[in-house]
């Protein structure tokens, strides 16, 4: 795949960031990590990302505030990843602009499936076929 999706993983727990980056890398995606909102902002200025996996509970600016700010300034897809998994938390996450919400602990395969679904809906998923897959051809 010439341009694998580039995912920004924002989580204050180093083990989670590193494990997610490795897992995404093994599954045909590029991953960059950030420990907090400040590091995320620096990464966004330095590169282009197809999706952000964003923790809700972080020191400094929390994930809900970050998501609200991201949504006000652009359209990059956001998947909230958090230990807050009750119904109200999920609803609030979606209301502030998250494209999806996954509670910890989670199955990495489910996270990957949700990322692929978001990218597909956003029109950024690579086509599975050859060079003409997903394209419309017209014939006279």
Image (cartoon, rainbow, N blue to C red):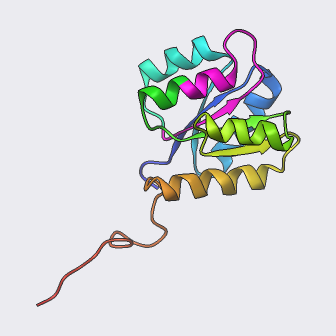
User: Where residue 72 sits in the image (x, y, percent)?
Assistant: 46, 27
The extreme bottom residue here reads 140
Which of 112 and 28 lies nearest the eye of the viewer?
A: 112
The extreme left residue here reads 140
User: Where residue 29 sits in the image (x, y, percent)?
Assistant: 57, 46
Residue under the point 67% across and 54% down: 114
User: Where residue 93 sits in the image (x, y, percent)?
Assistant: 69, 36
**What span is in magenta?**
50-68
Figure label count: 0
Q: Is residue 60 magenta?
A: yes
Q: Is residue 140 magenta?
A: no
Q: Is residue 20 above or below residue 65?
A: below
Q: Is residue 34 above or below residue 86?
A: above
Residue under the point 61% across and 33% down: 96
Residue under the point 69% across and 52% down: 112
Q: Quadrant of the C terminus?
A: bottom left
In the picture, residue 86 is in which quadrant? top right
In the picture, residue 51 is in which quadrant? top right
User: Where residue 116 sits in the image (x, y, percent)?
Assistant: 59, 55
Which of 4 and 120 lies nearest the eye of the viewer?
A: 120
Q: Is residue 14 left or right of residue 6?
A: right
Which of 7 and 29 lies nearest the eye of the viewer?
A: 7
Q: Is residue 25 left or right of residue 20?
A: left
Residue under the point 50% across and 58% down: 121
In the picture, residue 16 is in which quadrant? top right
């Amino acid at each position: 795949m010439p341009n694998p999706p580039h995912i920004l993983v924002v989580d204050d727990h180093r083990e989670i960031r590193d494990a997610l980056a490795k897992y995404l890398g093994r599954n045909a995606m590029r991953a960059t990590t950030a420990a907090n909102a400040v590091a995320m902002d620096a990464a966004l200025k330095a590169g282009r990302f197809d999706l952000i996996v964003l923790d809700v509970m972080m020191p400094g600016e929390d994930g809900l505030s970050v998501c609200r700010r991201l949504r006000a300034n652009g359209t990059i897809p956001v998947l909230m990843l958090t230990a807050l998994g009750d119904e109200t938390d999920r609803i609030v996450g979606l209301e502030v602009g998250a494209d999806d919400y996954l509670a910890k602990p989670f199955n990495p395969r489910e996270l990957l499936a949700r990322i692929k679904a978001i990218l597909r809906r956003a029109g950024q998923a690579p086509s599975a076929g050859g060079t003409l897959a997903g394209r419309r051809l017209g014939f006279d």
